[in-house]
Amino acid sequence: MRERGSQLFRRHRPSWRAPVELLSFGLYFLCAVLLVLSRIGHGVIADTRDGLVDLSAPLLEAASLPAIEARRAMERVRSYTAAFDEIDRLKEENDELKQWEWRTKLLERKVAHLRSLLNAVEEPGLAFVTGRVIADARGPFVRSALINLGRKDGLRIGYAVINGDGLVGRTVDAGGSVARVLLLSDLNSRIPVLVGPAGVRGLASGDNSSELQLDFLPDGAAVYAGDEVYTSGSDGTLPRGLKIGVVAGSAGALKVKPYAELNSLHAVSVLFFDTPALARADPSEAGVPGALSLAPSDRPGMTATASTPLPVATATADEISGGGGRAQGDP
Amino acid sequence: MTKLLPALSVLFAVIATAVPWGLPADATFILPLVVVMMVFCWRAIPGTALPPLGAAGLGLLADLMSGGPLGYWALMCLIAATVGDRPGSLGQGRDFGALWLIWIALVSALGVFGWLLASAYYFRWIDWWPIAFGAVATVVLFPVVLYGLLWIRNGRIGPARNVIFRGSS
């Protein structure tokens, strides 16, 4: 027993541990320094992070494939089990949409007529490129996603990211072939919005939960649950009219329920909406012609020709606010 | 290769934290905490090597992948590595129950510390629920992970089991 005890003593209390203790202390100190540098947004940290994330992108992409396929398979099984209900629902929705189509065509003609009377300048279309989410970022700090598009594809920091349901977030870091998208639900996300048919101005802020807070509404604003929320574009970085979600909750604690399912994103599109504000925020690409001018062919790896294999497309802001643009080559 | 097993298995878990599983927002804390738990377990299993430097490096990788502040998960892994190496004076006769209790205490402390650190980082109170949920989930998962790591180490839960599970024959 005594011998066993002495063995334990030898194992856990070596005669000289100073280098080990010193190393541990050094590591704790390094972590603290990194946290502080990260907090103040030191450039070296950001650059190193971008570089390393770029390096790890192929690995992440490969690792995410099985998970994506598994998710897709599960969704398929779920959809099979609810197929008949879904068919009934889609039939009803189709009937409703046919009526809407007819009304929309009427309105389109009317708008075109009024625009011609006013001699209004045509709104430029928006170019976009579509990519895939290759990694999630989960933790106490961020709700973000890595996508397999980067500066090589013409991305820069601040671009709006959408999927078929609506706005998803915006790019906050861009490496050569990967970019990080800050999701709407992130603690740091702030989107100026318009609410409801009256277009009441407000601010949709993320709080790391599945719904967004709706702040800075004018006193007595007529905002009700179910009202649609869309971007106002007043921050000068996002296009106006991108749909975000609907108002939920009760008066005094209004929330926004995003249309996009932010927990399970797959394919997303990045809108090339260049503005002076973005050029100031991300001056490294200042020399590249802006996408407001809408020239996908100006960007490396992209052309505006119909033969382009990339799902690069042009669409008007109205088309995009309706749930994403149409890829080139699509019918 | 055997010496690299702890680091490789944790690296695998770190990569898994970044994979888009489509987990709900409340469950986002589970996978990173499992990484911390693996570091703790590897340090607690006798005869394995996962030095603090390796643990911090893997935590740093988790920080990079998550896009969060650098140093956060590195710090968590480092604390787990420090505590895992010194679970009281149980020595080689550590039993499973005691190890589990130590993990419960550690993950509770880490949860509170992590929540305070995150709140201080952002100058606002962070939602505590995902952290608490993650901590509870790792407490439940602890036996599975520990058995899993022993299996990884030996290819089966054999002789090494005895040094952890006191009283088993």
Image (cartoon, coloured by chain):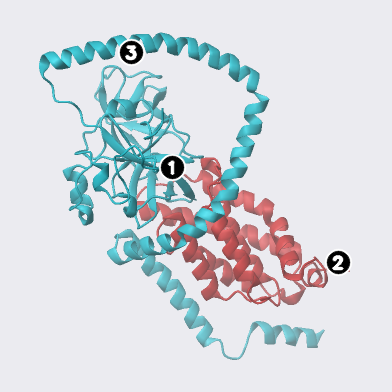
Chain colours: A cyan, B red
Depth check, mark 3 against mark 2: the one in front is: 3
**Residue A286 percent location from the top left of the image:** 18, 52
- Chain ID for label 2? B
- Chain ID for label 3? A
**Circle 3 — which element?**
helix
State the separation of the CA atoms marked 1 and 2: 45 Å
- Chain ID for label 1? A
* Residue drawn at x 49%, y 41% as measured from the top left: A266
**Circle 2 — which element?**
loop
Q: Is residue A266 visible?
A: yes
Q: Which residue is mark 1?
A: A208
* Residue drawn at x 59%, y 41% as measured from the top left: A71
Q: CB under 8 Å between callouts 3 and 2? A: no
**Circle 1 — which element?**
loop
* Residue drawn at x 68%, y 84% as measured from the top left: A11
Q: Residues within 10 Å of mark 1 (few under 14, many from 20)?
A: many
Q: Which residue is mark 2?
A: B168
Q: Which residue is mark 3?
A: A104
Q: Quadrant of the N terminus of chain B?
A: bottom right
Q: Which mark is residue A169?
A: none
Q: Residue furthest bottom?
A: A15
Q: Residues within 10 Å of mark 2 (few under 14, many from 20)?
A: few
